Amino acid sequence: MQTGVNTPHAVPEVVVETRNLTKIYRDFWGRQKVRALKALDLTIYKGEIFGLLGPNGSGKTTTMKLLLGLLFPTEGQAIVLGKDATDVSKNERIGYLPEETYLYRFLTGEETLDFFGRLFNMPAAVRRQRTAELLELVGLTGARRRQVREYSKGMARRLGLAQALINDPDLILLDEPTTGLDPIGTRAMKDLILRLKDQGKTIIMCSHLLADVQDVCDRIGILYQGELKELGRVDALLKVRDVTEIRFSGGDGALVDDVKQVIERRNGKIHFIGNPTTTLEELFLQIIRESEAHPGRRVRGGISGDGR
Amino acid sequence: MVVENPLPPFLIWFAGALAIWLGVVAAVSLVGFFLGWLAVALERGPREAVARNWQMICQAFQDFVRYISGSRISGLAYLAIKESIRRRVIAVFVVFLVLLMFAGWHIDPASREPAVLYLNFVLSATTYLMLLLALFIASFSLPTDIRNRTIHTVVTKPVRASEILLGRLSGFALVATVILIGMAIVSFFFVTLGLNHRHTLTAENLQSVTEGGGETGTLTGLTSSVFGHRHRVYVDVGGQGRVEVARGHYHSLRVVGSGPDARYEIGPPEGFLLARVPIYGKLEFRDRDGLDADKGLNVGDEWTYRGYIQGASPAALIWTFEGMSPRRFPEGLPLELTLGVFRTHKGNIEKPVLGSLAVRNPRTGLYVETEIFESREFAEVPEIKRLFVPRKIVNPPSVQIIQRKKNTPEGIVLSPPPEEVRPELTQKREFDLYEDLVDNGRLEVWIRCIEPGQYFGAAQPDLYIRARDGSFVINLLKACYGIWLVTIIVLAYGITASTFLSAPVAMVATIGVLVGGLFRDFVIKLALGQTYGGGPFESLYRLVTQENVMSELEPGLGTLLLKMADVIARGFLFAVASILPPLGQFGWANWVAHGFDIPWEHVLIRTLQTFAFAIPVIVAGYFFFKSREIAE
């Protein structure tokens, strides 16, 4: 049974909990170099997509590494899936996509997934099946016999995602998941993240690309200089409470004038009236879709269709 | 062959070695626990440090015993193999082939001991190349993974540190095994083809052997010269040919036809590649007064390996053999002897010195001399003399009862005691080796120098019964196995060093272990103060001041400080030497080169030693790896 955060009355299951989690980097002599994370208290629930945001050096990746046990906390504790973050056995239920694709370049795509499958003690037949499924999922079936060194950055990234999913994990940590992907890949990644959430998986991602975070995350935490500055649901945090947006289609200029008069009559302030714009991502994907549907034909000059 | 430090029987060795091993492991563990505690205590306080250390030890036990997974280890081993292939380790094999190519030009098959030369070369080349290979792959693997961060993707899977280390070790061991097998096969063919040669013999080369003015019908002559030597050949009346040994080998001879039309076909060399299985006895000395002595005389040689006895005196070299029975040696005892000869008056230095071989019954004291032989002081290669004590000894040159005399605090004890001496035993002219001279499986073999003013010297391994010949191929494989064991030790140290050091530093550290291991025996002697010239600091002082190592230093504060510094340095050296593997003892090249079978007991002991070093080293590597942050 899924006990996601959206279920109103169920008690949400805690997947990750940090208490006073602190990381101080020291030099060879033990002197403090930098305080990368300061007393982070964080709780992440099952079934949610949690985004960690922040500028470079804010402590996002340090938090991620502390949760994975790649770093040891200077103070405090991180509990992941009910176990201490340094306990290797928690990794049975974790998938991790690092910031860069840290894969063995001399292995082929197929060998890579088979190797990581072995690390989960998966039987050979299961490994074969899972490898085929994941390569299909990330669109690398045709390149399965090629060495990773021959992969483009996007392909390597997709293979990295496949290895993160090899064990069908309950908790997935994605460090900059859309870095290096083209817009189609980015959209596919975001769609996949949402599908994984629908399957009841918990996802923690950190990204510089705020739009990506906004698109997929249920909750976010904003870190700055190692401190948690903001934490909450995305929609609640982004809501501009004293501005009302009306969108409609149909009608003519007179209707627009009527609406303006009504607002002014009631002492409202009009900030903007005009046609909304789509996002560049939407435009790009629409062009690609139309190009695939009608090969050889120029799609259109722009959203207005006049080519200017 | 010189065996300076013979291994004790397995059970005796095992009991002593196990006690030392447990002691060293316990001491190192305690030191490790204390250092670990100190590191955590500085950050989190002493109580938590104890708790964390204890938790880590329990975790280690589980990671090595409970959670260890063959599938994960095989996966990581596979990765190590692929990595090795990517690193072009096969280049080592190519280098080996190139070395052999050049060696083929330079090794002289006409030398006095070509087999020793060939075998020493191939086994040394194999050893050094394998060690280099182990050094590189072990030291660079893990640090490269950490630097490239590929390790992040691995350690975030349910992989234990123990599996990461064991996976690497087994993968690299497999790579090393394959390369070593390739080298062994190439070495075998290189040696056999390099030593192969054929002599020719024609009827014109043969002359009749004359005896007492008349022809015996036997023909004799010399073969053609190949690789700087010829063989004397005998062909008897029946047409049976025999080729004498020269340069450590002989050939088969087939005579086709007879008379002047006879053709002589000489086969390939035989006896070059041997694996003699010796049975060693226990050596005791008898001095010139006829008293048993712990050791022989020193004739001024710095190398005290051999003890000497004076010629034309009661002095003797006495080897006691156990377990002699007609079932083991029905025809008699085939002995091989290497003697040191020291002449006090040189004269014609080429002239051999005479000696005698005798056997004695340890209970009755019956002493039967069986052979007089010659031995030379200056031989181009150590001369192995083949002697034989027949089952039936007829008309021996000398028969007597000899009582051994032992000096004890109670006085001189005779063996046999006078009341048990039976002079009638000497009346016989024909003796059966087992009935008359072996007592309860025990037999004494006596070697004496006959000539006055000359000396014979020997060490225990210098006389042995050549029980049988083992397979040379198996012996070569055993030597390669010895190389493999050293490779495993180096891999273990290299992998462990790479868990906490960067690749180049890990390599230097492993080289340090390797060099220290090769000179471990010396380091221990130095630590125990058994070397001349004092400890490290005193030696350094003597070096700088060119002080003689034998002379005492001037008493004073400086000398006192030097001696005190040496006490500390010696303690440190002893501690370091205790964790160094005795790599110098793993080399079996000499055994194979000199044609001696490597005893299975040695193989077992070295195998256990390998595990005894590799396992704690890998466990130490586990703790280093567990206690470091992978992401930095």
Image: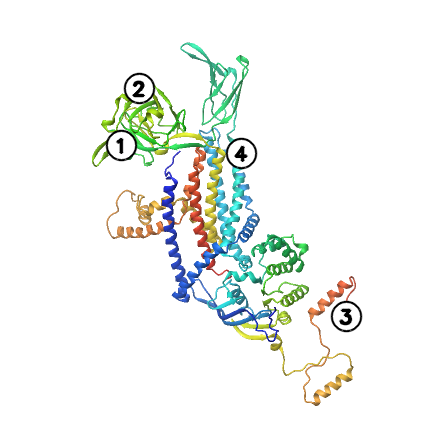
**How far apart in space, not on screen, are marks 1 and 4 (Cα)?**
50 Å
Vertical placement of B321 versus A146: above or below? above
Residue at position x 26%, y 51% in the image: B560
**How far apart in space, not on screen, are marks 1 and 2 (Cα)?**
28 Å
Residue with the mark numbered 4:
B189
The chain holding disc 3 is A
Nearest to the eye among marks 3 and 4: give it: 4
Task: Tell me the SS state at disc 1.
Answer: strand
Residue with the mark numbered 3:
A307
Tell me whether circle 1 and circle 2 mark residues in contact (CB < 8 Å).
no
Vertical placement of B263 versus B145: above or below? above
Instruction: Name which of mark 1 and mark 4 comes first in the sequence.
Output: 4
How packed mark 1 is, by other alpha carbons closer than 10 Å (few <14, some 14-19, many 20 or more), is many
Is A69 or B529 nearer to us in this picture?
Answer: A69
Is A73 or B539 nearer to us in this picture?
Answer: A73
Residue at position x 78%, y 81% in the image: A251
Quadrant where the N terminus of chain B is found in the figure: top left
Instruction: Specify the amino acid type for callout 1.
Output: Asp
How packed mark 3 is, by other alpha carbons closer than 10 Å (few <14, some 14-19, many 20 or more), is few
Q: Quadrant of residue B388?
A: top left
Instruction: Specify the amino acid type for callout 2.
Output: Lys
- Does B479 sit left or right of A222 as displayed? left
Instruction: Name which of mark 4 and mark 2 comes first in the sequence.
Output: 4
How packed mark 4 is, by other alpha carbons closer than 10 Å (few <14, some 14-19, many 20 or more), is few
* Image coordinates for residue B26, horizontal then vertical, percent: 38, 53
Residue at position x 52%, y 35% in the image: B188
Residue with the mark numbered 1:
B292
Q: Which mark is residue B498?
A: none
Residue with the mark numbered 2:
B428
Give the colour scheme of this rendering. rainbow
The chain holding disc 2 is B
